[in-house]
Image (cartoon, grey):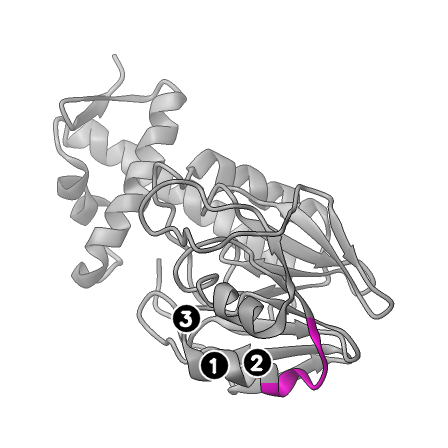
Amino acid sequence: MTAFSSKLPHYKELAAGVRRLLAPNPSMMTGPGTNTYLFGVRDIAVLDPGPHLVPHLDDIVRLADGPIRWILATHTHPDHSPGVKYLAAATGAEVLGMPAPRGEHQDMTFQPTRILRHGDRLETDEFVLEAVHTPGHASNHLCYRMPGKNWVFTGDHVIDGSTVVINPPDGNMQDYLDSLVHLRALRPAALLPGHGDLIDDPSRVIDWIVQHRLAREAKVLAAVEEYAGLTTMELVPRVYQDVAPALYTWAERSLLAHLIKLANDGRVREVDGLWSVHP
């Protein structure tokens, strides 16, 4: 979990028929803002319209330069999908993605008219988008692969310049690591994240994330061994010395995800909210 550094242009054509529009929602957690992607010229697909920010959503319609036929979401966190409902009402577009799971920080307004599963495709005369189920950050998280270029649009699975929060119970650290391995096996030519700029060295970035997560897991285990009987929040400053205190609340969620994985591996246990090594 590190600070973002990317400063993106508001609008950019990334390739013929692939455009990126930056939503005006910059923050400590979203970096420069949420990336909205537009595909096609004659018939348009929109990926991740972002939060319900009407000026941004109206910009999507204006910049599309053609009828918006499809709206897709990578997942249903508040910075990615709430704009879908407004945009669908304005355009009559078909909505594609996976429904929101129950829980906090979920956009229950997202109601796909076509539920996507792993391997499902949106195929047009201009482009193809293939759904790649990548649970971990969210159980309903989908990346989208563009087979012709072998580009993968990664939402929050891999982002530029930072690591993502894994927030139980919907977030799952083991699923996240497994999904990273699966993504790497696709040998993508580039990753186009939900926050930040295009990543043109996917294998290096994915390997760094996996190594970072495993190193953090080792620090979590070492802290539990040294400081048995602490709560997750008490463990945070002992594990996340590299993170600003302002981010401790979010760091605690990823720390808990590591502890749940370690507990499932038989390494630690929790009793009344206090963590210790498994005897």
Mark 3, residue position: 52
Using the image, tell me which numbered label, if any, was put on residue 25: none
Q: Is residue 179 magenta?
A: no
The answer to whether residue 57 shows anywhere in this view is: yes
79 relative position to 70: left or right: left
Q: Secondary structure at mark 2?
A: helix
Mark 2, residue position: 60
Q: Amino acid at mark 1?
A: His
Mark 1, residue position: 56
Mark 3 → mark 1, Cα distance in angstroms: 8 Å
267 relative position to 240: left or right: right
Q: Which residues are magenta?
A: 62-68
Dot 1, crowdedness within 10 Å: few (<14), some or many (≥20)? many
Dot 2, crowdedness within 10 Å: few (<14), some or many (≥20)? many
Relative to 178, say whether 41 is above or below: below
Q: Secondary structure at mark 3?
A: loop
Residue sticking out furthest to the top:
279
Which residue is at 29% across, 32% downward?
221
73 relative position to 169: left or right: right
